[in-house]
Amino acid sequence: MDPLIYLFVGSFVLVVAIAGIWGRISYRNQLVRIATSRQTNLPARPQTSISIERDGGRLWLRPLNIYIDGKKVGEVSPEEVKYFDVAPGEHAVEMRLDWLRSLSVVADVTRGQSCHLQCGIKKMFYGANAPIWSYLIFHPRSVLYLEQIPSFGPRTENRSTVIPLTVGFANLSGDDLVPFLTEDAAAISPMFKNTNIAPVTRFPSCEILFLYAHLRQDGTLAGIDVPAGLRQVAQLTSTTLVVLASPNPSDAAQKSAALPGQKSANLVLTLNRNGDGFSRFFRTLFERMEVGTSLLHAWVELAPQHPSAMPSFAPATLLLAEAGDIRFPDSVPTPSISTDAAL
């Protein structure tokens, strides 16, 4: 046999072996980085900064490169959070991975505040119906996503008092449910003393939790590694009220309500948000509770469950009052605005 063939075959085998070893080492290092990010607290946040959090999707474990104003400033792996000290003003932010590019987001950073962004691989590439790989070549700007999530702290909005609780928002899905979270946080968060928006696929510390997730056919929550329902989330976060704020089919919602678990919180499952009626409904509900009305009494007053008396803006929901009739603590005077109330 021609010696050149032996040389070609040997070189090919050597390249494959080196690539395999390099890939295995890179894969292990990324797993270590993910595990480390889970066990450590968030890094210190500069006063004026851009924060970038990557969701927990593991379609690609390779880190995404972060570019601010055209310059590479770092990289972020799944479930990592990075903060970058920047000057006040507008900054163009973009994520890159080889030839892939996210759409550029203009972050308007205010002095003394942090502009919060989330990134990752679009959910359309997960599952059996994902686009074929040639899509990556011809649509390089349709693979990565980069979304701005507003940071909400105490707002006055001509309010003399605030509810002395923390309202939290958790997104288990990624980019497809971000508009719902943004809309609800803008409408509801000014009523509360603190707002806590968790990184994607994580849960915040709060008394009232708005959760954005899809339900599997068996009623468990998609987007987390272990099969769990709303009761497990309530037990994990010690939350008094858990609202599944994303719309889900009624059969999945009913199966979710029937899942076993400790009944430690009141649960709300959403079937239809009715446009902006969802955020309007809960804002009105909390306004009634703010003046001393209990949850169940305020709910019955607002949505008496009779077609002729139901307000036109009411969303279609299921309420499971498993923690009983709860009340808000007395409201307190509006504090000075704090820029560190949201993650």
Image (cartoon, rainbow, N blue to C red):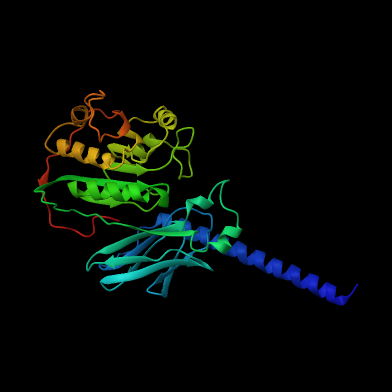
Viewer-nearest residue: 35 or 148: 148
Residue 304 sits in which quadrant?
top left
- Relative placement, left or right, of 229 versus 160 is right
In what quadrant of the picture does the C terminus appear?
Answer: bottom left
The reply to whether residue 264 is visible in this rendering is no
Give the image location of residue 23, x and y in percent.
61, 64
Residue depicted at 34% across the width and 51% down the height: 198
Q: Position of residue 51 (x, y in %)?
A: 34, 63
* Rendered residue at 22%/67% (across/down): 112
Residue sitting nearer the eye, 306 or 43? 306
Q: In this view, does 243 lie above or below 98?
A: above
Image-quadrant location for residue 263:
top left
Quarter where residue 214 is shown:
top left
Left or right relative to 22: residue 119: left
Q: Tell me where residue 158 appears, x and y as whole percent.
A: 10, 51
Image coordinates for residue 96, horizontal then vertical, percent? 47, 67
In the shown orientation, is residue 86 left or right of residue 145? Answer: left
Q: What residue is shown at x 23% (from left), y 67% (from top)?
A: 110
* Position of 333 relative to 257 (above/below): below
